[in-house]
Amino acid sequence: MEFIKEIAYVIFSIFNAMSVYLLLGFLFAGILHVLVPQHLFSKYLSKNNWLSVLYATLFGIPLPLCSCGVIPTAMAIYREGASKGAVVSFLIATPQTGIDSIIATYSLLGLPFAIIRPIVALVTAVFAGLTTSIFTAKDTPPALPKNSAISQEVKLSFAQKLKQVFQYGFVEMMEDIGKMLLFGLIMAGLITYFVPDDFFMIFGNNTFLTMLLVLLVAIPMYVCATGSIPIAIALMMKGMSPGTALVLLMAGPAANMASMLVIGKVLGRKTFVLYLITLIIGAIGSGLIIDNFLPASWFDVSNFNTMAHHSGHFYYFKVICSCILLLLFVNATWFHKHNHEHEQETISHTPQGETCSFKIGGMRCNHCKNTATKAIQHLASVQEVTVDLSSETAHVTGNPTDEEIKSAVEAVGFEFKGRIS
């Protein structure tokens, strides 16, 4: 029982330290999601030059998209005419940061890490994008249908926008990130208890080999930018260098098995190899710079437990925020899910013509669901569509052919698995 108490203690400490900043980050994420016009993507990213790479990086850094949510958006802007270099920049910059994870990074790892993380994401993404542009300049662009899931926008009133801000920030993002954050917290607790304090001395002072080991684990693993923070601080408290922690924070969110398969399929093997190599070079290079050229005092986390459990009014304010965050998580993962299932059942039994169902693979979050919904909705043969994320099923009213649905979902990076009924 003692080890359960210790693990729970670590989870509470980290969660309590993050709660205020996570609430603020989710609010900013909702504002950013609602207020940034999505047509800007196709307007500024369609040129095959360094400016489109820079714009893609600058657009991507603050966007609150998780590791899987960035894939359909990247594939959509590619269909809108974005260059491969711009798409690779977007794929690397976006999942590493996000306004929510930047604020959460500050809460646990301090101001230097919160500043360095987006800077490293910017430099790595620009380097990757320019490298990709150079090596793919002579590639013949594929004849792909443009996707209107990004180009179509609906004008909303202020009240509707405000509702969308809270809906996206405190329901959809909570539903998407909450599980990964919980995973990160549990992993942090397990690491704190089971990993010996001298574990990272396995390679002596050779942090380069430790970085390679972290890359080997982090690249195929699916973890979001926010969920990777508790894991990073737990490992740093066990002696992992700040530079190696940065490698984890970069490679974990920016690469996972699902995203790599889509990149290879849609953008081609050469672009995939360039994406992976430039990401690894950027991560290790940045990590080595931090470990060898920046003051170690900037990244000291030895007094984290003292900071997390000090008494005073702000401590109790953090506890209140933790309770609010927990309630929002329960609402997003339980009540909202069951309400959506009830609506799904009602819609699927509403007689509005012939309704058929299709299996769609690769959807992991609400952003994926919304992207797939918009892609199918654009078809002239479709009257209505509802997508169920848990069963990966699209219920479509109208008379679309299998080929139409296949083209629509594959255009935004998902897998068409056939008609169910």
Image: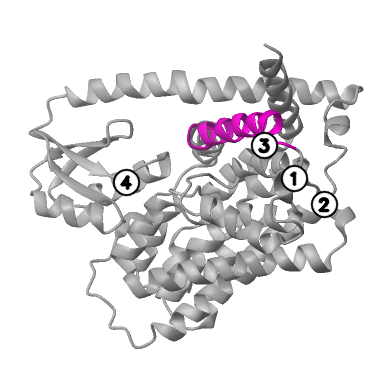
For marks 2 and 1 on the same chain, the one whose residue lies earlier in the sequence: 1
Choose mark 4 or mark 2, whichever is in front.
Answer: 2
Report the mark closest to the observer, 2 or 1: 1
| Dot 1 alpha-carbon crowd within 10 angstroms: few under 14, some 14 to 19, many 20 or more | many
Is the residue marked by circle 3 packed among few (<14), some (14-19), or many (20+) residues within 10 Å?
A: many
Dot 4, how many residues are within 10 Å of its Cα: few (below 14), some (14-19), or many (20+)?
some
Residue at 84% across, 64% down = 294
Give the spatial CA distance, label 4 vs label 1.
Answer: 33 Å
Mark 3 highlights which residue? 22
Q: Is residue 62 visible?
A: no
Mark 3 or 4, closer to the camera: 4
Q: How is the image coloured?
A: one colour
Q: Which residue is mark 2?
A: 299
Earlier along the polypeptide chain: callout 4 or callout 1?
1
Q: Amino acid at mark 3?
A: Leu
Q: Which mark is residue 236?
A: 1
Badge 2 marks a residue whose secondary structure is helix
Tell me if label 2 and label 1 are in contact, CB under 8 Å.
yes
Above or below: residue 170 compared with residue 63: above
Kind of residue sitting beneath label 4? Gly
